[in-house]
Amino acid sequence: MNNKTHQPVMLKEAIDALQVKAGRWYVDATFGRGGHSQAILDQGGRVVGLDFDEQTIDLARRRFSEALENNSLILVRENFDKLTQIIEQLKQEKVLSGQIWGILFDFGTSTDQLMAEDRGLSFEHRQAKLDMRLDNRLGVKASDLLKVLTVKQLTQIFEDLGGEEQAKKIAKAIVRVRENNPADLEVVGSLVALISANKSRRSGHLHPATKVFQALRIAVNDELDNIERVLPQALALVNPGGRIVTIAFHEGEDRPVKQIFAEWEEQEKGVRISKKPIQPTETEINQNPRSRSAKLRIFERKE
């Protein structure tokens, strides 16, 4: 089966950064549709692919059946913050042999996940439940947060994780609604209407609810803490001379990567290949506007 129907953001830059060599093992910590992994396999590399989405893994097992059969691909349904545990278990089971030469993280949420009606991540599915869990094994949904957090806590989430300018006004409106009709905080359409009513007219290309929805998604899935937890694991696992490559799509994701890579370089654990992030070409931005905010960073472990 042809797996090249979907090309992820900054594919060439990411694969070049990994310096793929035939026969070596690489970790694609955010497998998604498998675009990065396919490119690694095409160059003779071998891949451990991680994804916490059950549907994604099921689809990948069908799409990549040949690579799975010839042992050039291992798929694991798990969150990347358990990276050390996953790799150690694969080695103990003798499924994985050899060193890890590169680890790739694409922190963007896939279009498939955003548009899935049952997740409540898209404004288009107005009747969808406000779930927002990317891994359905997680316990807390977005609607749960909206029903229990204080105005102060909601404001902080909307400001820190979404950059929402009207955070406090929206937080107060949410608390007012839940006191009178908490069921209105169960579905996407009600929250979108509440946010729109408490913001000035739409400016630029962003929907009024974009920043609040982003903030809730990050909070529900503990995305930023996961990044801070996994990077030290990645450094310990990657072979000396190997590389960690990250692609971030907003400042909240990129900030911890930037800080941690700088600290490692100061501690002489390795080098940042570029002090400034690599960004997509104008050609790619024109072809895929979603790539506009992408920032790619590379860290090479000291030999």
Image (cartoon, rainbow, N blue to C red):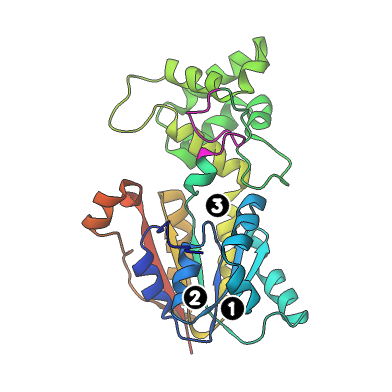
Question: Which region shows up in magenta?
Answer: 115-126
Q: In the rendered image, which residue does mark 2 sit on?
A: 41
Compute the Cα span from label 2 to label 1.
Answer: 7 Å
Does residue 122 show up magenta in the picture? Answer: yes
| Most distant residue in the top direction | 180
Per the image, label 2 sits on a secondary structure element best described as helix
Q: Position of residue 286 (x, y in %)?
A: 24, 50
Asked whether residue 118 is in view, the answer is yes
User: Tag 2 or tag 3, which sits nearer the N-term?
Assistant: 2
At label 2, counting other C-alpha atoms closer than 10 Å, the crowd grade (few under 14, some 14-19, many 20 or more) is: many
The disc label shown at residue 72, or none: 1
Residue 295 in percent (x, y) is at 36, 58
Q: Main secondary structure of the magenta part?
A: loop
Q: Amino acid at mark 3?
A: Leu
Residue beneath label 3, please?
Answer: 224
Q: Are marks 3 and 2 in contact (CB under 8 Å)?
A: no
Q: Nearer the viewer, mark 3 or mark 2?
A: 2
- The three-letter amino acid code for the residue at tag 1 is Ser
Q: Residue at x 30, y 60 (%)?
A: 279
In the image, is residue 90 above or below residue 178? below
Dot 1 or dot 3: first in sequence order is: 1
Q: Classify mark 1: helix, strand or loop.
A: loop
Q: Quadrant of residue 47?
A: bottom right
Instruction: Report the amino acid beneath label 2.
Output: Leu
Q: Nearer the viewer, mark 1 or mark 3?
A: 1
Whether residue 144 is situated above or below residue 82 in the rendered picture: above
Query: Above or below — where is 44 with respect to 246?
Result: below
Across and down, in percent, residue 196 comes to: 43, 19
